[in-house]
Image (tube, grey):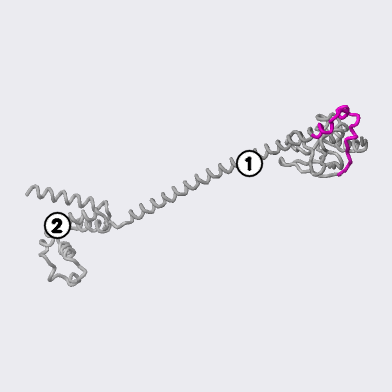
Amino acid sequence: MNNQLSNILKSHLQGGSNHVIKVSSNGVKLVKSTSAQKYAFTLEDIESKYGSIAQFLQALPEKGFSGAVVFTLQKTYTKDGKTTYHTLQTLTEKLTQDMNATDPTTAFLGAPELMAKMVQAERSADYKEQVQELKETVKDLRSRNRVLEETNSSLTIKLETAKEREELRVERELLKKKSFLETPAFEKTMETLGGMLPRILEASGGNAVGHPSQLASPNVSPIQKAFVQKLPTATDEQVMFFNYLLDNWQEDLITQVAQIIEQQQEHHEDTN
């Protein structure tokens, strides 16, 4: 047993709870049973599992760590849940099965084969643990991916709905802005007012010949001429009323006036 190596490891580990060692051989690292800092051994880890540093060193060849074994002496620093390692020293020691010659478990026939199977079994357990951790990681990533896909689908539906609402809003605005002259309500109003056209022309003499020159313009219709001829006989209140209709020529107002006119016409026809 290399007492000097044992003393060096002990001195380092006793320096503080953040002092750890890592053991490796031929690219294989010694693993603890727990997943947290599974390659870093504190003094407490060694004593709880092996009893002492000396016994820890004796057990290494049995675990397959023989020949040139590397001991990495480190200090750990943890911040915001993340642990970093600072290497203080690296030692390479040759460990052999002869170190455990007095161990009765190695004195019977077939012990080397048994030790090899034990090492293989322990490494297999380590591999299974790593595989399980990878499976959990993949499961977590798949779950996150599923959540992202659902979120993306929800956002797509909301976007399509928003586009449909915007199209409906634009269509409504266009309908609101559509000229009253293009609506069925205007056609109904003109039908009602059109029934009065013969009487208006009859009352005005059928034409506007002999009237002021401005009425002779080709842009002035017979209806307009007849209306102008009536102005001298209209009161100020009547002119103000017709002026208000002209200034506020909107669907609701004209429709209501047309309905009143239509009712008066029907009443007049009923009484004749």
Horizontal side of residue 120 vs 267, given as left or right: right
Q: Residues within 10 Å of mark 1 (few under 14, many from 20)?
A: few
Q: Residue at x 85, y 39 (%)?
A: 66
Quarter of the figure with residue 184: bottom left
| Residue lying at the far front of the rendered structure | 109
| Residue bearing the label numbered 2 | 196
Q: Is residue 222 above or below residue 79?
A: below
Quadrant showing the N terminus? top right
* Residue at x-position 33% and y-position 54%: 175
On the image, the x and y values in percent for residue 212 come to 16, 71
Q: Which quadrant of the structure image shows residue 245?
A: bottom left
Q: Nearer the viewer, residue 152 or 241?
A: 152
Q: Is residue 19 visible?
A: no
Disc number for residue 102: none
Q: Earlier in the sequence, mark 1 or mark 2?
A: 1
Marks 1 and 2, Cα distance to the nearest angstrom? 85 Å
**Crowding near pointer 2: few (<14 within 10 Å), some, many (20+)?**
few
The image quarter in which residue 115 lies: top right
Asked if the stretch drawn in magenta spans residue 150, the answer is no
Q: Residue furthest bottom?
A: 213
Q: Position of residue 100 (x, y in %)?
A: 89, 32
Q: Amino acid at mark 2?
A: Met
Nearer to the camera, 2 or 252: 2
Q: Is residue 192 left or right of residue 137?
A: left
Answer yes or no: is residue 128 visible: yes
Residue 170: x %, y % from top left: 38, 54
Tell me the tag on residue 138.
1
How many numbered discs, if any? 2
At 12% across and 70% down in the image, what residue appears?
A: 209
In the image, which residues are magenta?
Answer: 90-116
Identify which amino acid the numbered label 1 is placed on: Val
For the residues labelled 1 and 2, say whether their Cβ atoms are less than 8 Å apart. Answer: no
